């Protein structure tokens, strides 16, 4: 790790390849973080929720379970107990070791971007990974967007601090980390690329400086995360194979014109 940081520090940070290197590095770290987060969540479900309470959480189309736990008999009171214990443990960890990791996650990342020069403590992504996996894994009322955004932002800020980058660059790294995490875990690299640029403001504004680094980081993280999926889930349309055959490229002209009109509108 130290040798890699030394190489990047010696890299000409004024060259056009600066953000290509840094964004790819963020994408690798955030992609691995998304894998750990998803696996840990499913592991907790497989240990505490599914066999004990007999409750199997619903999944979106195309989701891939890493584990195949035995489903126990559904017992409502055990489900309530598992949820309560998971929430208590998660809350204790947060308020003992990293109070800023409480809550949704996205709001804390936005606050760090605007009010803290992009500075996030190094422990935050690790604490957020554990506590959010505990909450979701025990059927708590939570989702993956906020946690993975703060986890990715924390990794980006951590790398920027280790590389001793400026406050401006640290904020860009933090935003790229947010995009990388979201793009990876939801397998939506384009949405992830735009996520951090537009979510930083209440109005219809866009942080243009973060778009390109976010796009690179999100694409790399998406590729890393997809390596853990079954081959048929990596680049398969969610609604099945498209039954469409093109004889001549001229057939696409009406669709191209329609796309242009809709884009202009």
Image: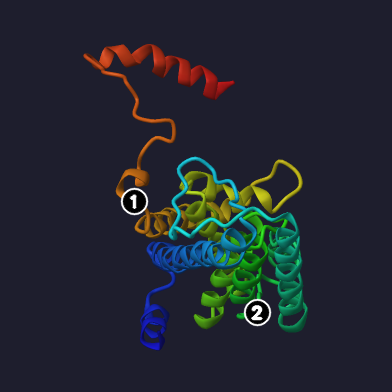
Examine the image and state in which quarter residue 90 appears.
Answer: bottom right
Residue at 54 percent of width and 69 percent of height = 156
Pick the front one: 184 or 249: 184
Examine the image and state in which quarter residue 89 appears.
Answer: bottom right
Decide if residue 260 is on the left or right side of residue 127: left
Across and down, in percent, residue 12 comes to 39, 74
Q: Taking 122 as reference, is 16 above or below it?
A: above
Image quarter where the C terminus lies is top right
The residue singled out by tag 1 in the image is 230
Q: Taking 57 as reference, is 53 above or below it?
A: below
Indicate the secondary structure of the residue bearing disc 2: loop
Residue at 64 percent of width and 68 percent of height = 134
- Crowding around mark 2 (Cα neighbors within 10 Å: few <14, some 14 to 19, many 20+) is some
The residue singled out by tag 2 in the image is 121
> Going from the N terminus, do you reach mark 1 or mark 2 first?
2
Across and down, in percent, residue 99 comes to 76, 76
Q: Residue furthest front?
A: 73
């Amino acid at each position: 790790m130290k040798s890699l940081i030394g190489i990047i520090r010696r890299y000409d940070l004024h060259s056009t390849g600066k953000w290509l290197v840094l964004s790819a590095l963020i994408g690798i770290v955030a992609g691995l973080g998304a894998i750990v987060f998803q696996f840990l969540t499913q592991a907790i479900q497989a240990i505490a929720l599914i066999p004990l309470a007999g409750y199997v959480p619903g999944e979106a189309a195309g989701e891939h379970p890493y584990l195949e736990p035995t489903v126990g008999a559904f017992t409502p009171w055990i489900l309530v107990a598992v949820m309560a214990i998971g929430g208590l443990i998660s809350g204790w960890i947060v308020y003992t070791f990293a109070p800023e990791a409480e809550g949704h996650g996205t709001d804390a990342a936005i606050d760090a971007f605007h009010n803290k020069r992009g500075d996030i403590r190094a422990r935050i992504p690790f604490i957020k990974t554990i506590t959010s996996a505990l909450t979701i894994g025990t059927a708590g009322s939570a989702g993956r967007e906020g946690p993975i955004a703060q986890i990715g932002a924390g990794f980006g800020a951590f790398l920027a601090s280790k590389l001793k980058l400026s406050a401006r660059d640290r904020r860009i790294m933090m935003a790229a980390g947010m995009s990388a995490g979201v793009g990876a875990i939801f397998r939506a690299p384009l949405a992830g690329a735009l996520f951090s640029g537009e979510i930083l403001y209440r109005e219809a504004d866009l942080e243009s400086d973060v778009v390109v680094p976010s796009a690179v980081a999100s694409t790399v993280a998406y590729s890393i995360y997809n390596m853990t999926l079954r081959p048929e889930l990596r680049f398969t349309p969610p609604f099945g194979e498209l039954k469409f055959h093109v004889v001549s490229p001229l057939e696409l002209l009406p669709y191209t014109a329609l796309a242009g009109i809709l884009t202009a509108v």
